[in-house]
Amino acid sequence: MHDRFAVRGTGIRAFQVGSREELAARASEADVVVVSGLWDNALLEKAPKLRFVQSVSAGVDQYDQAAFRARGVRLASAQGVNANAVSEHAMSLILAMARLLPQARDNQAKHHWRGMIGEIARREDELGGKTLLVVGLGRIGGRLARLAKAFGMHVVGLRRDPAAGADGADEVHSIASLKEWLPRADIVALTCPLTPETTGLIGAEALAAMKPTARLVNVARGKVVDEAALIAALREGRIAGAALDVVVEEPLPESSPLWDLPNVFITPHSAGETQRYEDNVLDILVENLDRLQRGEDRLHNQIV
């Protein structure tokens, strides 16, 4: 991020830190902090000059918004910068599960040439005609809906305000209707933000409502899912599988049963990673710095 910012030639002095300890030690020097995973709300007390924090992530649950307001520090998210990457990753996970690609990779590592599977229900599958339930029809969910439509899927989107539009889905309904739609879905994709309303949204009751042949894809936040309930459902075969880019505790602890479940496919919270990520964030940062310089009240993707 620092190197890409330097290329822009803004004339703004910038430095980079690589650890929480280094950030805490040098926070007092900064008027603006560009950060995500290293953020600690205690920094607000250690940085008297701080006026603006640009998050490099779309999620902002790590920031104490009340504390930001109390200190008069502005906060903006990076919402939208990884919409293409995350939606494409989600579609990749859906395809990987349908085409049994994780199993194929495992067989390659073992130098095993697997023959055609005799049992029809255990074979690779097609997506055409399947129903995809997208929970959270924002920028990521909307683009996932459009991608899935290209594969002939029937896409049902759930969002807090259905009046905001279908955004590529065949149908749009309120998130309050989740229980109604879970039994109809072949794949449930989570693309919603983590909020008090979505924390634990997919728990034991929701998992029990899904088809035994259904699969869960989570590219949202780990805490949207009750992880213990998910592990139990996967172990008992109450759903067919799950593809998880996010988990409750990251990195995923070595002791987690998720590592060894054969019907789980894990990627390391890499859905948002793209070769353009830094430049996409910097586009927002530079625009916001210009707005601050002009004394504007509203920032791009303003949170506080």
Image (cartoon, rainbow, N blue to C red):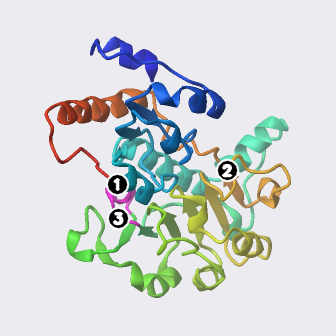
Q: Where 281 sits versus 182, above or below?
A: above
Q: Quadrant of residue 52?
A: top left
Mark 1 or mark 3: name the one nearer the start of the chain: 3
Q: Say left or right for 303 vs 192.
A: left
Residue 271 location, x and y as percent?
A: 52, 44
Residue at screen point 38% across, 32% down: 32
Give the residue type at disc 1: Ala
**Type of amino acid under label 3:** Leu
- Which is the main secondary structure of the residues drawn in magenta? helix
Report the magenta residues as a range.
Answer: 136-152
Task: Give the amino acid at mark 2.
Answer: Ile
Residue 13 locus on image (x, y percent): 37, 15
Query: Which residue is disc 3 drawn over?
Result: 137
Q: How would you rate the neighbour count of disc 1 (Cα within 10 Å): few for under 14, some for 14-19, many for 20 or more?
A: few
**Left or right for 65, reference 125:** left
As drawn, the label of residue 266 is 2
**Image marks 3 and 2: residues in contact by CB distance under 8 Å:** no
Circle 1 residue: 150
Binning the other alpha carbons within 10 Å of mark 2 as few (below 14), some (14 to 19) or many (20 upward) gives some
Residue at the image position 40 percent from the left and 64 percent from the top? 153
User: Tag count in the figure?
Assistant: 3
Q: Is residue 97 above or below residue 92?
A: below
In terms of sequence position, does the residue under pointer 3 or pointer 2 come before the other?
3
Residue 285 image position (x, y, % from top left): 31, 33
* Mark 1 and mark 3: Cα distance apart in space: 17 Å
